[in-house]
Image (cartoon, helix red, strand yellow):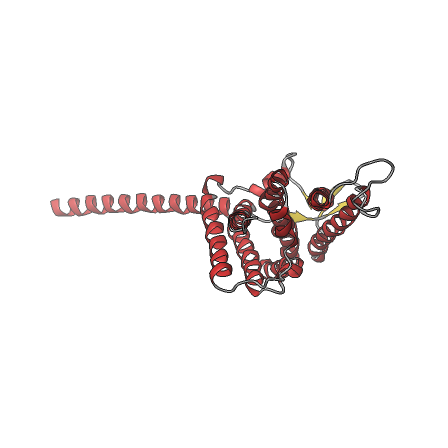
Amino acid sequence: MRWLILAVHFREREWAFFSQARLYFFWCSQEFALKSEIHIMPLPVFSSTDSQTNSQVCTAPWWGAWSAILIVVCFYFTQSVGIVMVQMVAGLGAGFSQGDAGFPAIDQTWLLPLSLCVATIGAAMVSLQVATSRAKLSKHSVWLWEFIEQSNDLRELWRFVLLGLGLGLGFFALTEYGVLPPDDLPQPIFDALLTAPLLLQIGWVLMIVLLFPVVEEILFRGFLFTGLAQSWGQTLAGIVTTVLFVAVHMPKVLEYWPALFAVTLIGTLTVFIRIRTGSLAPGIALHSTYNGVLVASALLTQPAS
Protein backbone atom coordinates (compact mmCIF):
# COMPACT_ATOMS: atom_id res chain seq x y z
CA MET A 1 0.00 0.00 0.00
CA ARG A 2 2.85 2.34 0.85
CA TRP A 3 4.45 1.70 -2.56
CA LEU A 4 1.13 2.45 -4.26
CA ILE A 5 0.82 5.79 -2.43
CA LEU A 6 4.40 6.68 -3.39
CA ALA A 7 3.76 5.76 -7.03
CA VAL A 8 0.62 7.92 -7.12
CA HIS A 9 2.50 10.78 -5.44
CA PHE A 10 5.34 10.43 -7.98
CA ARG A 11 2.89 10.44 -10.88
CA GLU A 12 1.27 13.60 -9.50
CA ARG A 13 4.66 15.33 -9.22
CA GLU A 14 5.60 14.14 -12.71
CA TRP A 15 2.32 15.43 -14.15
CA ALA A 16 2.82 18.78 -12.40
CA PHE A 17 6.35 19.02 -13.79
CA PHE A 18 5.28 18.37 -17.36
CA SER A 19 2.36 20.79 -16.97
CA GLN A 20 4.76 23.50 -15.86
CA ALA A 21 7.08 22.62 -18.76
CA ARG A 22 4.24 22.90 -21.27
CA LEU A 23 3.26 26.25 -19.84
CA TYR A 24 6.87 27.43 -20.04
CA PHE A 25 7.29 26.33 -23.65
CA PHE A 26 3.94 27.89 -24.53
CA TRP A 27 5.11 31.17 -23.00
CA CYS A 28 8.40 30.97 -24.94
CA SER A 29 6.55 30.33 -28.19
CA GLN A 30 4.31 33.33 -27.56
CA GLU A 31 7.32 35.52 -26.85
CA PHE A 32 9.02 34.29 -30.04
CA ALA A 33 5.90 34.98 -32.07
CA LEU A 34 5.65 38.46 -30.59
CA LYS A 35 9.29 39.18 -31.43
CA SER A 36 8.77 37.83 -34.94
CA GLU A 37 5.85 40.19 -35.39
CA ILE A 38 8.02 43.06 -34.20
CA HIS A 39 10.80 42.44 -36.67
CA ILE A 40 8.77 41.31 -39.68
CA MET A 41 6.18 44.02 -40.07
CA PRO A 42 3.40 43.93 -42.64
CA LEU A 43 3.86 46.22 -45.60
CA PRO A 44 1.96 49.50 -45.82
CA VAL A 45 -0.98 49.37 -48.22
CA PHE A 46 -1.65 51.57 -51.22
CA SER A 47 -5.36 52.14 -51.67
CA SER A 48 -7.76 54.43 -53.51
CA THR A 49 -9.95 57.10 -51.93
CA ASP A 50 -13.74 56.86 -51.82
CA SER A 51 -15.00 60.24 -53.05
CA GLN A 52 -18.29 59.85 -51.14
CA THR A 53 -16.88 59.14 -47.68
CA ASN A 54 -13.36 60.52 -48.22
CA SER A 55 -12.04 57.26 -46.81
CA GLN A 56 -9.46 54.95 -48.30
CA VAL A 57 -10.51 51.55 -49.55
CA CYS A 58 -8.56 48.72 -51.15
CA THR A 59 -9.27 48.11 -54.84
CA ALA A 60 -7.97 45.97 -57.67
CA PRO A 61 -4.67 44.09 -57.27
CA TRP A 62 -2.96 46.29 -59.85
CA TRP A 63 -3.53 49.42 -57.72
CA GLY A 64 -0.36 48.97 -55.66
CA ALA A 65 1.93 48.49 -58.67
CA TRP A 66 0.32 51.38 -60.54
CA SER A 67 0.68 53.66 -57.52
CA ALA A 68 4.34 52.71 -57.03
CA ILE A 69 5.26 53.29 -60.68
CA LEU A 70 3.38 56.59 -60.68
CA ILE A 71 5.36 57.79 -57.64
CA VAL A 72 8.71 56.91 -59.25
CA VAL A 73 7.77 58.51 -62.58
CA CYS A 74 6.61 61.67 -60.79
CA PHE A 75 9.92 61.87 -58.94
CA TYR A 76 12.19 61.61 -61.98
CA PHE A 77 9.98 63.80 -64.13
CA THR A 78 9.87 66.49 -61.45
CA GLN A 79 13.60 66.20 -60.84
CA SER A 80 14.40 66.62 -64.54
CA VAL A 81 12.07 69.61 -64.89
CA GLY A 82 13.47 71.09 -61.69
CA ILE A 83 17.06 70.88 -62.89
CA VAL A 84 16.17 72.63 -66.15
CA MET A 85 14.18 75.32 -64.35
CA VAL A 86 16.93 76.05 -61.82
CA GLN A 87 19.49 76.30 -64.60
CA MET A 88 17.25 78.60 -66.60
CA VAL A 89 16.65 80.84 -63.60
CA ALA A 90 20.38 80.91 -62.89
CA GLY A 91 21.01 82.14 -66.42
CA LEU A 92 22.26 79.01 -68.15
CA GLY A 93 20.67 80.02 -71.43
CA ALA A 94 22.38 83.42 -71.34
CA GLY A 95 25.81 82.07 -70.38
CA PHE A 96 27.82 82.15 -67.21
CA SER A 97 30.07 85.09 -67.85
CA GLN A 98 27.32 87.69 -67.63
CA GLY A 99 23.87 87.53 -66.05
CA ASP A 100 20.63 88.88 -67.43
CA ALA A 101 18.84 92.00 -66.18
CA GLY A 102 21.75 93.06 -64.05
CA PHE A 103 21.84 89.87 -61.95
CA PRO A 104 25.24 88.20 -61.68
CA ALA A 105 25.40 84.78 -63.26
CA ILE A 106 26.15 81.69 -61.17
CA ASP A 107 29.35 79.85 -61.95
CA GLN A 108 28.83 76.36 -63.34
CA THR A 109 30.81 74.94 -60.44
CA TRP A 110 27.93 75.97 -58.18
CA LEU A 111 25.13 75.53 -60.69
CA LEU A 112 25.28 71.73 -60.96
CA PRO A 113 25.04 70.94 -57.22
CA LEU A 114 22.52 73.73 -56.66
CA SER A 115 20.17 72.54 -59.39
CA LEU A 116 20.60 68.89 -58.42
CA CYS A 117 19.93 69.55 -54.73
CA VAL A 118 16.90 71.81 -55.28
CA ALA A 119 15.41 69.49 -57.94
CA THR A 120 15.92 66.36 -55.82
CA ILE A 121 14.31 67.86 -52.73
CA GLY A 122 11.43 69.26 -54.80
CA ALA A 123 10.88 65.94 -56.57
CA ALA A 124 10.94 64.11 -53.24
CA MET A 125 8.26 66.42 -51.88
CA VAL A 126 6.08 65.89 -54.96
CA SER A 127 6.48 62.10 -54.75
CA LEU A 128 5.71 62.19 -51.05
CA GLN A 129 2.51 64.09 -51.74
CA VAL A 130 1.51 61.55 -54.40
CA ALA A 131 2.26 58.69 -52.00
CA THR A 132 0.27 60.39 -49.24
CA SER A 133 -2.77 60.62 -51.49
CA ARG A 134 -2.59 56.96 -52.50
CA ALA A 135 -1.50 55.17 -49.31
CA LYS A 136 -3.43 53.99 -46.28
CA LEU A 137 -1.53 56.03 -43.71
CA SER A 138 -1.07 55.83 -39.99
CA LYS A 139 -3.23 57.97 -37.74
CA HIS A 140 -0.09 59.74 -36.58
CA SER A 141 1.27 62.75 -38.41
CA VAL A 142 4.77 61.27 -38.38
CA TRP A 143 3.77 58.35 -40.58
CA LEU A 144 6.79 58.76 -42.88
CA TRP A 145 9.22 58.29 -40.02
CA GLU A 146 7.27 55.21 -38.91
CA PHE A 147 7.44 53.96 -42.51
CA ILE A 148 11.23 54.40 -42.55
CA GLU A 149 11.98 53.13 -39.07
CA GLN A 150 9.10 50.67 -38.53
CA SER A 151 9.98 48.80 -35.33
CA ASN A 152 13.61 48.19 -36.20
CA ASP A 153 15.90 48.90 -33.26
CA LEU A 154 18.08 51.79 -34.37
CA ARG A 155 20.77 50.64 -31.95
CA GLU A 156 21.31 47.61 -34.18
CA LEU A 157 22.15 49.69 -37.26
CA TRP A 158 25.90 49.36 -36.58
CA ARG A 159 25.84 45.96 -38.29
CA PHE A 160 24.58 47.49 -41.51
CA VAL A 161 27.05 50.35 -41.19
CA LEU A 162 29.85 47.77 -41.00
CA LEU A 163 28.40 45.95 -44.01
CA GLY A 164 28.35 49.17 -46.03
CA LEU A 165 31.89 49.92 -44.89
CA GLY A 166 33.07 46.50 -46.03
CA LEU A 167 31.35 46.79 -49.40
CA GLY A 168 32.79 50.25 -49.98
CA LEU A 169 36.31 49.19 -49.08
CA GLY A 170 35.96 46.10 -51.24
CA PHE A 171 34.86 48.15 -54.24
CA PHE A 172 37.70 50.61 -53.63
CA ALA A 173 40.25 47.78 -53.51
CA LEU A 174 38.84 46.25 -56.68
CA THR A 175 38.97 49.51 -58.63
CA GLU A 176 42.28 50.66 -57.22
CA TYR A 177 44.30 47.43 -57.38
CA GLY A 178 42.22 45.14 -59.60
CA VAL A 179 40.14 46.27 -62.55
CA LEU A 180 41.23 49.86 -63.12
CA PRO A 181 38.57 52.16 -64.59
CA PRO A 182 39.31 53.64 -68.03
CA ASP A 183 40.71 57.16 -68.10
CA ASP A 184 37.78 58.47 -70.14
CA LEU A 185 35.12 56.98 -67.82
CA PRO A 186 32.45 59.69 -67.29
CA GLN A 187 32.03 60.55 -63.60
CA PRO A 188 30.39 63.99 -63.60
CA ILE A 189 29.44 64.06 -59.93
CA PHE A 190 32.80 62.87 -58.60
CA ASP A 191 34.67 65.11 -61.07
CA ALA A 192 32.63 68.07 -59.82
CA LEU A 193 33.30 67.03 -56.22
CA LEU A 194 37.06 66.84 -56.68
CA THR A 195 37.35 70.17 -58.50
CA ALA A 196 35.00 72.13 -56.22
CA PRO A 197 36.13 74.56 -53.50
CA LEU A 198 36.02 73.38 -49.89
CA LEU A 199 32.61 74.80 -49.04
CA LEU A 200 31.06 73.26 -52.12
CA GLN A 201 32.78 69.94 -51.41
CA ILE A 202 31.02 69.84 -48.06
CA GLY A 203 27.72 70.35 -49.87
CA TRP A 204 28.53 67.56 -52.32
CA VAL A 205 29.43 65.20 -49.47
CA LEU A 206 26.15 65.91 -47.67
CA MET A 207 24.17 65.23 -50.84
CA ILE A 208 26.01 62.03 -51.78
CA VAL A 209 26.15 60.56 -48.27
CA LEU A 210 22.83 61.75 -46.82
CA LEU A 211 20.37 63.17 -49.34
CA PHE A 212 20.71 60.72 -52.24
CA PRO A 213 20.71 57.47 -50.18
CA VAL A 214 17.70 58.54 -48.09
CA VAL A 215 15.69 59.61 -51.14
CA GLU A 216 16.60 56.50 -53.16
CA GLU A 217 15.81 54.09 -50.33
CA ILE A 218 12.43 55.68 -49.64
CA LEU A 219 11.65 55.82 -53.35
CA PHE A 220 12.79 52.33 -54.40
CA ARG A 221 12.81 50.06 -51.35
CA GLY A 222 10.00 52.08 -49.81
CA PHE A 223 7.27 53.18 -52.19
CA LEU A 224 8.20 51.15 -55.28
CA PHE A 225 8.82 47.86 -53.51
CA THR A 226 5.74 48.30 -51.30
CA GLY A 227 3.40 48.88 -54.23
CA LEU A 228 4.85 46.12 -56.39
CA ALA A 229 4.82 43.65 -53.51
CA GLN A 230 1.17 44.45 -52.87
CA SER A 231 0.32 43.49 -56.45
CA TRP A 232 2.93 40.89 -57.41
CA GLY A 233 4.37 39.48 -54.21
CA GLN A 234 7.67 40.24 -52.51
CA THR A 235 9.94 38.06 -54.68
CA LEU A 236 8.94 39.51 -58.04
CA ALA A 237 8.71 42.99 -56.51
CA GLY A 238 12.27 42.69 -55.22
CA ILE A 239 13.59 41.64 -58.64
CA VAL A 240 11.78 44.44 -60.48
CA THR A 241 12.83 47.02 -57.88
CA THR A 242 16.49 46.02 -58.22
CA VAL A 243 16.33 46.06 -62.03
CA LEU A 244 14.80 49.55 -62.06
CA PHE A 245 17.33 50.75 -59.47
CA VAL A 246 20.17 49.57 -61.69
CA ALA A 247 18.47 51.05 -64.76
CA VAL A 248 18.39 54.59 -63.37
CA HIS A 249 22.12 54.28 -62.61
CA MET A 250 22.86 52.71 -65.98
CA PRO A 251 24.35 55.81 -67.70
CA LYS A 252 26.94 56.03 -64.91
CA VAL A 253 27.93 52.37 -64.63
CA LEU A 254 27.33 50.82 -68.05
CA GLU A 255 30.89 51.34 -69.27
CA TYR A 256 32.53 49.83 -66.18
CA TRP A 257 31.39 46.40 -65.05
CA PRO A 258 32.63 46.62 -61.40
CA ALA A 259 30.43 49.68 -60.93
CA LEU A 260 27.48 47.85 -62.52
CA PHE A 261 28.12 44.88 -60.22
CA ALA A 262 28.35 47.15 -57.15
CA VAL A 263 25.07 48.94 -57.93
CA THR A 264 23.34 45.60 -58.52
CA LEU A 265 24.71 44.22 -55.27
CA ILE A 266 23.62 47.27 -53.28
CA GLY A 267 20.15 47.12 -54.83
CA THR A 268 19.81 43.40 -54.08
CA LEU A 269 21.06 43.65 -50.49
CA THR A 270 18.85 46.59 -49.59
CA VAL A 271 15.76 44.82 -50.95
CA PHE A 272 16.68 41.67 -48.99
CA ILE A 273 17.19 43.74 -45.83
CA ARG A 274 13.88 45.50 -46.44
CA ILE A 275 12.09 42.15 -46.60
CA ARG A 276 13.85 40.68 -43.58
CA THR A 277 13.55 43.68 -41.25
CA GLY A 278 10.45 45.41 -42.57
CA SER A 279 12.31 48.69 -42.17
CA LEU A 280 14.10 51.15 -44.44
CA ALA A 281 16.53 52.34 -41.76
CA PRO A 282 19.06 49.47 -42.18
CA GLY A 283 19.14 49.94 -45.96
CA ILE A 284 19.66 53.68 -45.54
CA ALA A 285 22.52 53.02 -43.11
CA LEU A 286 24.17 50.58 -45.53
CA HIS A 287 23.67 52.81 -48.58
CA SER A 288 24.91 55.97 -46.84
CA THR A 289 27.99 54.25 -45.46
CA TYR A 290 28.84 52.77 -48.84
CA ASN A 291 28.55 56.16 -50.52
CA GLY A 292 30.59 57.71 -47.72
CA VAL A 293 33.44 55.27 -48.32
CA LEU A 294 33.43 56.07 -52.04
CA VAL A 295 33.52 59.80 -51.34
CA ALA A 296 36.30 59.45 -48.76
CA SER A 297 38.39 57.27 -51.08
CA ALA A 298 37.93 59.73 -53.95
CA LEU A 299 39.00 62.67 -51.79
CA LEU A 300 41.95 60.88 -50.20
CA THR A 301 43.33 59.46 -53.43
CA GLN A 302 42.92 62.47 -55.71
CA PRO A 303 46.21 63.59 -57.28
CA ALA A 304 47.85 66.62 -55.77
CA SER A 305 47.24 69.80 -57.75
At x 15% / y 47%, what residue is drawn?
A: 4
- The count of marks equals 0
At x 35% / y 44%, what residue is drawn?
A: 23
Percent from the top left, x then y, of residue 103? 82, 36
Query: Where 43 falls versus 102 (above or below)?
Result: below
Percent from the top left, x then y, of residue 179? 51, 65
Percent from the top left, x then y, of residue 37? 50, 46
> Is 53 on the left or on the right of 8, as rendered?
right
- Quarter-wise, where is residue 139 in the image? top right
Name the foreground residue: 26 vs 221: 221
Residue reaching furthest to the left: 2
Q: Would you say residue 218 is visible in this rendering?
A: no
> Is 182 on the left or on the right of 155, as rendered?
right
Percent from the top left, x then y, of residue 299? 54, 47
Q: Would you say residue 273 is visible in this rendering?
A: yes
Residue reaching furthest to the front: 305
Name the foreground residue: 262 vs 143: 262
